[in-house]
Image (tube, grey):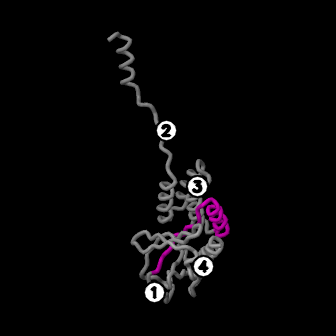
Amino acid sequence: MPLLSVLIFAALLLAPPPSRAPRPQRSAEVVAEAQKLIRQQRYADAINRLEQFLETSPEDAEALTYLAAAHLYADREHLKASEMFTRAFDAGGGASFFVTHSHESVMSGEDVTNYCRGWLHLRRGRVEFAPDEGTHGFSARYADVAEFKQNRHKSFFHLKLGGANQNFRPRTKEELETLLILALYKRFSR
């Protein structure tokens, strides 16, 4: 092998590998990360991560949905959250709330002893509950919801599906969050 060929071959062997651009994260990965951060009450981290992702995908409906949720829990500015959830809905997303779902058949007070936690989603044409654990979630068309209203204990609300009440309490345990959920349901279910 001529000396020049040996030198070129050696240079190729010793050269660092070509740099590869980092793989862009997909929306589902970013949203799953944001959901985890919101569950952990790390709202600022969720907001930063979602805003970073939205710089390159400004109309990503699910990222907009969870950005609104993170801001709701971080700032407790319900009007701002309503506007952000509406923007997400218009982009094809909706509104998502981290809630406590009561398994008790009768709500006798403000304490819930038999419950799970998960995400209540208001989407175009549907309301869904996705529990963090278990299999008792649901997805229903708005037309199948017989009732969606505030309970006697003002921080709770329920929806009636197939004759059974599904009782929920929002993360903040505040009536204002309950009222926001009910208002968005009314707007989105039209």
Q: What's the residue type where badge 4 is placed?
A: Glu
Front residue of this view, candidates 87 and 78: 87
Q: Earlier in the sequence, mark 3 or mark 4?
A: 3
Lateral position of residue 127 relative to residue 6, left or right: right
Q: Under tag 4, what secondary structure?
A: helix
Q: Is residue 159 part of the magenta span, yes or no?
A: no
Whole-angstrom CA distance, mark 2 to mark 4, is 47 Å
Write the start and end of the magenta stretch as one range. Answer: 77-102
Local crowd at mark 2 within 10 Å, few (<14), some, or many (≥20)? few
* Residue at horizontal 59 percent and vertical 50 percent from the top: 57
Residue 122 in percent (x, y) is at 57, 69
* Residue at horizontal 59 percent and vertical 65 percent from the top: 94
Q: Which residue is mark 3?
A: 60
Say whether marks 4 and 1 touch (CB < 8 Å).
Answer: no
Q: Under tag 1, what secondary structure?
A: loop
Q: Earlier in the sequence, mark 2 or mark 3?
A: 2
Q: What's the residue type where badge 2 is placed?
A: Ala
Say whether marks 2 and 3 touch (CB < 8 Å).
Answer: no
Q: What's the residue type where badge 3 is placed?
A: Asp
Residue 140 in percent (x, y) is at 52, 73
Residue 54 in percent (x, y) is at 59, 52
- Mark toward the viewer: 3 or 4: 3
Q: Which mark is residue 105?
A: 1
Whole-angstrom CA distance, mark 4 to mark 1, is 21 Å
- The outermost residue toward the top is 2
